[in-house]
Image (cartoon, rainbow, N blue to C red):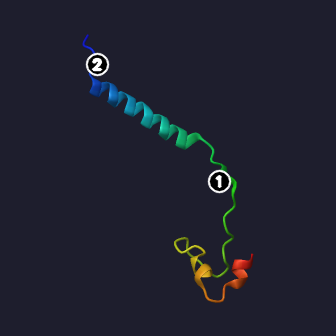
Amino acid sequence: MEALTNFQIAAAVAVVYGTWILLRTLFKKNPLDNVPGPRPVPGLKGWLRGNWPALIHPRSWSYHRK
């Protein structure tokens, strides 16, 4: 049985570290998950634009005060 080369050891460490980061990202709870997002503005449809038209409209002061 041959000894492992430095490259093989580094590759194994990189794979284990990458797997750990991936699993931690998938299963760890993020405290920002419980923060509610802005309510949808009636009349503005489309998931692509979101609330952007309400944010940049010149007469949207009532939206900003909420």
Q: Position of residue 45 (x, y in %)?
A: 59, 77
Q: Is residue 39 left or right of residue 45?
A: right
Instruction: Say which element carries label 1.
Output: helix
Vertical side of 37 occupied by 54: above or below? below
Query: Is any atom of residue 14 visible in this view?
Result: yes
Residue lying farthest to the top in this orientation: 1
Residue shown at 69%/61% (left/top)?
A: 36
Type of amino acid under label 2: Leu
Residue lying farthest to the right in this orientation: 66
Residue lying farthest to the left in this orientation: 2
Residue shown at 66%/85% (left/top)?
A: 60
Count of numbered circles on the image: 2
* Residue that carries the numbered disc 1 in the rendered image: 32
Vertical side of 40 occupied by 43: above or below? below
Residue 39: image quadrant is bottom right
Q: Is residue 34 left or right of residue 4?
A: right
Residue 59: image quadrant is bottom right
Residue shown at 57%/77% (left/top)?
A: 52
Q: CA distance from mark 1 to mark 2?
A: 43 Å
- Pointer 1 local density, CA inside 10 Å: few below 14, some 14–19, many at least 20: few
Please tell me which of labels 1 and 2 falls first in the chain.
Answer: 2
Q: Position of residue 53 (x, y in %)?
A: 58, 81
Residue shown at 39%/33% (left/top)?
A: 15
Pick the front one: 42 or 11: 11
* Residue that carries the numbered disc 2 in the rendered image: 4
